[in-house]
Each structure stands twice: as C-alpha cells, then as structure tokens.
C-alpha cells in the first residue's frame, strides 16, 4: 500500500497527531470501526518507518483521486525548451506544453508541414536556420492590476534570444519571436502589471546588428540590450511593429523585475561583469569567472518606461536590423537608464508586493541588499553625480539602499508571502531563508523588521524559488517551491545525469516552522523559474468553441471541412484533400497521389465531446497532429517517394481506435 493510500485511510478515520502518534506501535483495535482503521494505519506507518512529520506532510499534499489541485505551477522546462504545468500541492504533472522543441503528443511543430511548425519557424534565425530546441528560464503569467489574470503565459529562450506567447485557453504556444538584435536573453520574460509590455532583458553582449567585432573592440562595439515587446490582448500576440529596444553597456544584464504600485513604470535588472572582462585563459588572462567577479560592485539597471516611450514617440531611435533602438547615449541623456551599485556578483532583483523595495542578491555576498524605490526616485530627481564610462548616471549606494540583511551563503532569488516575510534561495547553503520585511509589511509579522527568522535546508543546489502568487501585488503565502538542481541522494539512481527536484515547502505557519513536505523530481531539463496561480483563476476551454476551429488563429477556419465536403481533388500537381475525423474513422480513407505532387490536406475533427481527441500520423512524411474536439488543421507537403503509407489515429479514442486508419498511396509519376 502506498503512503498516499495510507493517508487517505487516516483522513477517513479522522486520525490526527493529537489522537495518536503514527510512529507508536499500533493501538489495540476497539469495537469502534474508525479506531480499527486508525490502528491499521499506525501499523502501516510503523512498518514503513514513517515519522509523524512524514505523515503530516503526506496528508498536506495528498489530493484524492478525482479531486483537483488548488494551485497550478507553470514551470520552465529548462533546456527541454518546454513549459511544465503542475498541480499543487499534489505536484502531479499535468502537461508539458510544447514551446521551443517539437512535442509529438500535442502535434506541436513536428516536421515542417503543419501550422504549428510555422509558429516555431517564427523563431528561426535571420539567415533561416531552424532551431529545434531552446533553453527556457523564466515563465511569466499575464497580470491585470498586478495580479495574475490566468489568460496568457510568456517564456524566454536564453540560447538564441527568443520569446514565446502561450494562450491559457488551450495551453498552446501561439507565437515565437526571435529577437532581431541579440542571440541571448536571460532577464526574460517579465511583464508589467497590466501586461502591456513583455520585458526581455539580455545577457551576453555582442554587436547589435549581428556583425563581427573582434574581442579588442568589446567596449567600443559590443552591446547589451533590453527589449520591450508590446503585447496586444485583443490579438493575443506581441505586436512587433510597436516594440522597441534600449541599448545597454556591454555588462552582462541579468534577471529583471517590473515595478508595481509605487514603482510602476520602472524596470529593475541585475547585471554583472561591469569589469567588462573578456576572458582569454588560453592567452594567460584570468578566466572569465575570475575577471568578472573582481569588482565589489556591479550595477542594478533602473529603466523608466515612460521616458522610453516618450523617446520612441519623439523619433529618438536608430533602426538596427529594421528594429527601433534607443541608443545608449540617448538612454543616458534622457534618464531612461540609471544605475545603482549592487554588491558582489548580483543575480536576482525582485520587487516587493507593495512595489516599495527591490531586493538584490549578490551571489558572493551573504546579504541581500534592499533598495528603497522612493529613495531611488529622489536620487534620480536630484541628479546623478557620477557616471559610468558610457555616460549612464550612477546613484549613490548609501542614498538608495534601505538596509542589508544577512541571510546566508549564495543568495540568488527572493519571493514574498502575505505574512510580511521574504524568502531567499541560498545556493551555497542549499537552504531557503525566511526573513522579515519592514515598511508596509511591518505589521504583518510579530518579529523585528529586516531580520533572518529561519532557514529550511533543501536538497541541493537551489536556484529559483517560487511562492503561491509570489510575484503579484497580493501573494497567497501558502506554499513555496524550491527549484533544486542535482538531487544527489533523493531518488533512485537513473544514471549519472541527476533529476532536478522541486521541493514543496509549507510556508503557511509563521516563525520558524517551514517544513519540506514533498519531493517532486522533474524528468527533463533544468527548470529555472516558475510562477504559481490559484487554479480557479484559470478558465481553459474543454473543447474548441466551434467545430472547424483553428487554434493558431483562435478563430473559425474558413478552410474547415463540413460533413459531406470530404474528398480529394487535383489541379495539375496540386492535390487538395478534405478530411473529417469522427469516432472511429477518417473520411476519406483512400488518398491517391503521385510522386512530385504538392498536397494540401485540410482536416477537421467533428467531435464536440470533452474527451474526443484524434491524432493523425502519416508515416514517411514526419507528420503527426493532435486534433482536439472541434479543431481544424491544414498541412502542406511535397510527395517525393512512392509507396503505400497507412495513416492512423494516434489517440486511443474508442474501442475501434486501432481501426481508425486510411491509405495514402503514392504512385510513381
Ligand atoms: S536564473 S537559477 Cu535563469 Cu537564477 Cu537559473
Ligand atoms: Cu481517433 Cu484513435
């Protein structure tokens, strides 16, 4: 019997820790049926060596079969290129949304024939190179007035500088955009509190036009970039033509966060390598990691969105690769960009729920540094007295810092709850630190402000952490997920490559109680960040709104095939197939073509029931589609090889699913 079943029994029996210690030996059965069950549970717990804490954790996380989770976690799939959808607190994996990597189950971007593959092609390199993987780091849920609204998700792709838009009505990727100026992003994606802008911060500098410049020209020609993608809710797409970028110095820009409430209109991005180290270990130079971490301070980048849009409206942009860019000179002169010094190889920059503070973690500093937004605004208004080599105004550290809080070794990222606590991941300590906030959060907790309260060890190498609705103006403070890399001793060994581990922590109690209650290995690439939304804020479709729906346009497809319209027609070498799918057959079942034909195949799933998905696998053509109820797909391909190929449905859709097939017969020309 599994621990889950055990817990269910305990719940049924009304067993609690007060009534009975699960670690104790079984109590004698009484005539009361409940106690008999409870004593059985005790015996199982004793036999399995479960502690009281184990049982409490299991009771907290068990979601009985047939019931739904309270929260949904949207996690990056790391270098799988995908996005994970996980129920919480059960940590059950619900979906791996295909984004930057073809995903056959969803028919996502498999081969070149489908419209979803054209969406993936939206992220092709300027020279046409097709990319079939990605390194996703930071998903962002759309917000209205600073709160998740459950409508859209965005996720970056670090390796080649791309951004994707996912529609949460059907959990499918709708748009992938290649950044025209940069081959890398890391400070992405983040949204402004109204989701008007999707922010793409950079990482590795290079000449923005994609040209070659030698490493000796690093300071002169290599540049960083922050890209502001304009999101249009009515179309559900990023509007490329209303988007623009801001040139930044060739420091390595890092994670960003959008301001909210008092800091609305501001963007904060960490950065490192203000040393502008360029490595060259083979020439006797210090290695990059040493060169980059020499200085005590790097620069927190502080952007002003209103000043950016004013500069764009006034035409103060240069066109680079056909894309408007506010030059570094303009950004410095117009006060679009300011710097505040930040200590010791900074990484995360996180804005508190009230928007008043920005928490920065220096990876080599045991403190987090808390900046005051009102103080930043005053310092900007007073005018920067110092400038970096590119003319960007530097604010005085002591003037803009509210406080530094010692939290432990290797701080990376910070999240928030509803009890006035902040939570910082400690990479070197392998722990989550809980510390108190001051300011408007002071009354929410009973401890002194700005003080470390507790550390919970995690296993191991924690990167990001995420709390329930933790990036919003009103976090829920119920759970925290520690996103750990390389779980060396947590799971059965599955070879030298170790699973990543999401550890669930219960943060609902105050003070020093903050236990780990579940381990959830992730069987794909390193997930960096995630966001957690209350499940009832999502309103996904159960079936497409109308039969003949095109998910790529989210509208009725004029090419949809109605019953009776099926058939194969030929016009020269162009063959048009019109098919319908319904349990358990394709119409037509025989499609005759010749080598050299160009096939346009329209397919409509006529089903309207919740569970009536059909697949379409066509051997020899690298084609696989998933047609959910009501969905229409059109594919186009050239036929190059003769033979007979049996297409079939890939979803076990009925008792006669194996019979749901047809013949694609290619005669010699
Ligand atoms: S980053 S932990 Cu993108 Cu912190 Cu990975
Ligand atoms: Cu349709 Cu199997």
Image: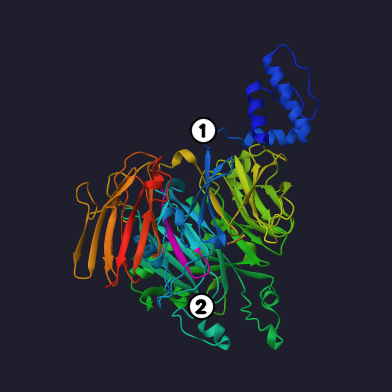
Residue 296, horizontal then vertical, whole percent: 69, 70
Residue located at (22% from left, 46% from top): 563
Say which quadrant the N terminus sits in. Answer: top right
Numbered badge on residue 223: 2
Q: Is residue 128 left or right of residue 395?
A: left
Q: Does any portion of residue 438 appear in the rendered image?
A: no
Residue located at (47% from left, 76% from top): 328
Q: Is residue 59 magenta?
A: no
The reply to whether the C-beta atoms of the residues labelled 1 and 2 are less than 8 Å apart is: no
Image quadrant assignment for residue 359: bottom right
Numbered badge on residue 623: none
Closer to us: 166 or 398: 166
- The magenta region covers 157-169
Residue 639, horizontal then vertical, whole percent: 32, 69
Closer to us: 644 or 78: 644
Numbered badge on residue 66: 1
Residue 568, horizontal then vertical, whole percent: 22, 58
Closer to us: 336 or 411: 411
Does mark 1's beta carbon lie closer than 8 Å to ligand 2? no
| Crowding at mark 2 (Cα within 10 Å: few <14, some 14-19, many 20+) | many
Report helix, strand or loop for mark 1: loop
The CA span between labels 1 and 2 is 53 Å
Closer mark to the observer between disc 1 and disc 2? 1
């Amino acid at each position: 019997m599994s621990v889950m079943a055990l817990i269910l029994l305990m719940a049924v029996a009304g067993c609690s820790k007060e009534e009975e210690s699960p670690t104790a030996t079984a109590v004698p059965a009484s005539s009361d049926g409940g106690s008999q069950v409870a004593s059985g549970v005790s015996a199982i717990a004793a036999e399995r060596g479960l502690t009281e804490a184990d049982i409490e954790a299991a009771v907290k996380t068990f979601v009985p079969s047939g019931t739904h989770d309270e929260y949904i976690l949207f996690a990056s799939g790391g270098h799988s290129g995908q996005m994970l959808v996980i129920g919480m607190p059960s940590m059950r994996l619900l979906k791996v949304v295909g984004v930057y990597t073809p995903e056959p189950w969803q028919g996502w971007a498999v081969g070149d024939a489908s419209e979803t593959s054209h969406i993936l092609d939206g992220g092709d390199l300027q020279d046409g190179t097709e990319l079939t993987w990605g390194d996703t780091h930071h998903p962002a849920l759309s917000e209205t007035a600073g709160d998740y609204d459950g409508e859209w998700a965005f996720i970056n792709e670090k390796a080649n500088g791309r951004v994707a838009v996912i529609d949460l009505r059907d959990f499918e990727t709708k748009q992938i955009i290649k950044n025209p100026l940069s081959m890398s992003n890391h400070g992405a994606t983040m949204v402004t509190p109204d989701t008007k802008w999707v922010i793409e911060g950079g990482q590795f500098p290079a000449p923005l036009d994609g040209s070659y410049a030698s490493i000796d020209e690093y300071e002169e020609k290599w540049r960083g970039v922050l890209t502001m993608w304009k999101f249009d809710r009515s179309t559900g797409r990023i509007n490329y033509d209303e988007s623009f970028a801001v040139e930044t110095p060739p420091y390595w820009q890092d994670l960003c966060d959008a301001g909210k409430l008092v800091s609305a209109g501001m963007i904060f991005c960490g950065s490192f390598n203000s040393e502008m180290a360029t490595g060259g270990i083979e020439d006797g130079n210090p290695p990059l990691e040493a060169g980059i971490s020499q200085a005590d301070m790097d620069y927190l980048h502080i952007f002003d969105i209103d000043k950016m849009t004013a500069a764009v409206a006034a035409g103060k942009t240069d066109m680079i690769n056909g894309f408007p860019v506010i030059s570094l000179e303009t950004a410095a002169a117009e006060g679009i960009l300011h710097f505040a010094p930040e200590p010791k190889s900074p990484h995360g920059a996180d804005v508190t729920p009230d928007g008043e503070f920005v928490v920065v973690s220096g990876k080599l500093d045991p403190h987090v540094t808390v900046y005051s937004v009102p103080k930043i605004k005053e310092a900007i208004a007073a005018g920067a007295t110092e400038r970096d080599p590119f003319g960007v105004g530097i604010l005085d550290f002591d003037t803009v810092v509210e406080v530094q809080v010692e939290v432990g070794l290797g701080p990376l990222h910070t999240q928030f709850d509803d009890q006035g606590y902040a939570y910082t991941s400690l990479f070197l300590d392998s722990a989550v630190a809980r510390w108190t906030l001051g300011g408007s959060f002071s009354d929410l907790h009973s401890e002194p402000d700005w003080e470390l309260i507790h550390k919970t060890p995690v296993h191991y190498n924690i990167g990001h952490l995420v709390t329930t609705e933790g990036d919003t103006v009103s976090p829920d403070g119920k759970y925290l997920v520690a996103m750990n890399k390389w779980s060396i001793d947590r799971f059965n060994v599955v070879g030298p490559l170790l699973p990543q581990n999401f550890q669930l922590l219960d943060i609902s109690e105050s003070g020093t109680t903050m236990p780990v209650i579940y381990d959830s290995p992730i069987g794909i690439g390193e997930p960096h960040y995630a966001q957690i939304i209350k499940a009832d804020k999502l309103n996904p479709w159960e079936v497409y709104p109308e039969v003949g729906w095109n998910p790529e346009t989210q509208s009725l497809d004029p090419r949809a095939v109605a019953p009776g319209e099926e058939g194969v027609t030929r016009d020269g070498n162009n063959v048009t197939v019109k098919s319908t799918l319904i349990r358990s057959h394709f119409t037509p079942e025989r499609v005759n073509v010749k080598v050299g034909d160009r096939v346009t195949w329209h397919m409509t799933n006529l089903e309207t029931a919740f569970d009536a998905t059909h697949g379409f696998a066509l051997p020899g053509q690298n084609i696989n589609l998933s047609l959910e109820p009501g969905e229409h797909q059109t594919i186009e391909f050239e036929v190059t090889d003769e033979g007979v190929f049996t297409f079939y449905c890939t979803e076990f859709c009925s008792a006669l699913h194996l019979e749901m097939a047809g013949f694609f017969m290619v005669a010699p020309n």
